[in-house]
Amino acid sequence: MIRKEANQLIALILTATIALASGCASSGGYSVGPNSGQPAEEQRAAGPSIEKPFMVVAVFDPNIPEDPNKIEKEAIWPELRRTEAVRLAKSLTGQLSSTGAFDGVRTTPDTETSAHLYTQGKILKSNGEELDLDMEVVSIQGDQIFKKSYRFKVDEYMLADPRKGRNSDLYEDFMEEIAVDIAAKVNRLKADDLQELARVEELRYAEFFEPNFSDQYLAKNWMGELKVVSYPSPEDPMMRRIESLKIKDQMFIDALQNDYQDFSDTSNAAYTSWQRAAYTESKAAREAKNKAAVQGALGVLLMAGAVAAGNNAGYNDYGTIIGATALGVGGLKTIQGAMGNSRQAKAHKETLSELGKSLNTEIAPKVMELEETQVELKGTAQEQYATWRSALREIYKQETVPNVAL
């Protein structure tokens, strides 16, 4: 009897121990944030989830050197480069949208906009004939999703392609290629990756209004990576208020798309005319430069041959002397011809530099409604968006300050 009671007691102890161990294991070692009293599986399941990411395409880096001599040497015209930086971003936005891999794609002045993914481009060269770009896609978590350098060259038939028309952008097909590459990479993201992006994006957006807000919901795993381990309740008053401001923020970004489209439409005739003229000039400059190099080398060889022939000739070897003289004259004329082609190449570059000076990147001022208040926005898109976000933050601060007389 005593042995039977003892066995029952041991069984109860084992059962309690197993249950306790199971409860500890299910917590995953996390106990962070206001929801830490919930089971860890519920914590990790909390927060938003997405099927496709939202992508932002920042206006490209025009890559304009600070040194005026370098600008002149590389035939870079700043006004045109800034115009291209906007047009390329807008074009890529449209191509990315067409892939169907994203839950919205927007052009923005920089990467300050809240999004799941950010595409950034840098113009290395653009002369109508050649377009060289560095492209990168990073996540809201700071992870590099995609990185590639592109070296494009316009085929001459593209200038008169009947499918596109005379005012078509010669770089459009290049943007399509980039978009397909990026979409292919993004489509390989797993469901867990997308959920993590969604949660981090909302926490980071909340930090714009409440600095360091996300710290309480993050922890490092055994690899040292930050992971979301808990999430504020969707009924949290602060989160609900921030979500309403986020909707207004998105409305501004949506309105900004009209400005970028208007800019692209307005600049299209001038820009596509520049592309075609620049293509002709760039091709001529390259051919003239190559011809100058070949002629210069040939001239040096001829002059060297003349010197060698003259040194080997005797005083009475009139035939060799005459041949050497002819070689020398031919070499001199060849070098002079090369100098002429070099000047021609320089003239072509100067022509290119004159083609891009009349394009402008300013957008029209606008007035936006915010909490029954009109916010006037002026300047570039970047300046307007900075003003708008400051207004959003000010509204949030006013609502969080207690209306109590001290």
Image (cartoon, rainbow, N blue to C red):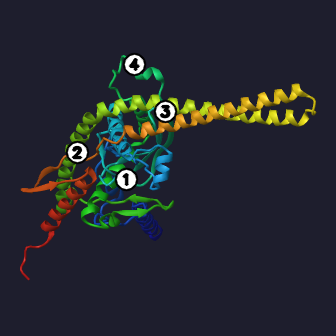
Look at label 2 and name its amino acid. Answer: Leu
- Of the numbered discs 2 and 4, the one sitting upstream in the chain is 4
CB contact under 8 Å: marks 2 and 4: no
Q: Which residue has dot 1 on it?
A: 140
Q: Name the residue beneath numbered marker 3.
A: 282
Question: What kind of element bears circle 2?
Answer: helix
- Residue 125 drawn above or below residue 2: above
| Residue 45 x/y as whole percent | 32, 52
* Residue type for callout 4: Asp
Amino acid type of the residue tagged 3 in the rendering = Ser
Residue 133: x %, y % from top left: 47, 41
Query: Residues under labels 1 and 4: Cα distance?
Result: 40 Å
Q: CA distance from mark 3 to mark 1?
A: 40 Å
Give the mark toward the camera: 1 or 4.
Answer: 4
Q: Badge 4 is on which residue?
A: 161
Task: Name the one closer to the observer, 86 or 406.
Answer: 86
Q: Is residue 235 visible?
A: no
Q: Earlier in the sequence, mark 3 or mark 4?
A: 4
Q: Nearer the viewer, mark 3 or mark 4?
A: 3
Q: Residues within 10 Å of mark 1 (few under 14, many from 20)?
A: some
Q: What residue is shown with label 2?
A: 256
Among the 4 quarters of the image, the one containing residue 385: bottom left
Q: Is residue 404 left or right of residue 130?
A: left
Of circles 3 and 2, the one toward us is 3
- Residue 190: image location, x then y, percent: 42, 42
- Foreground tag (2 vs 4): 4
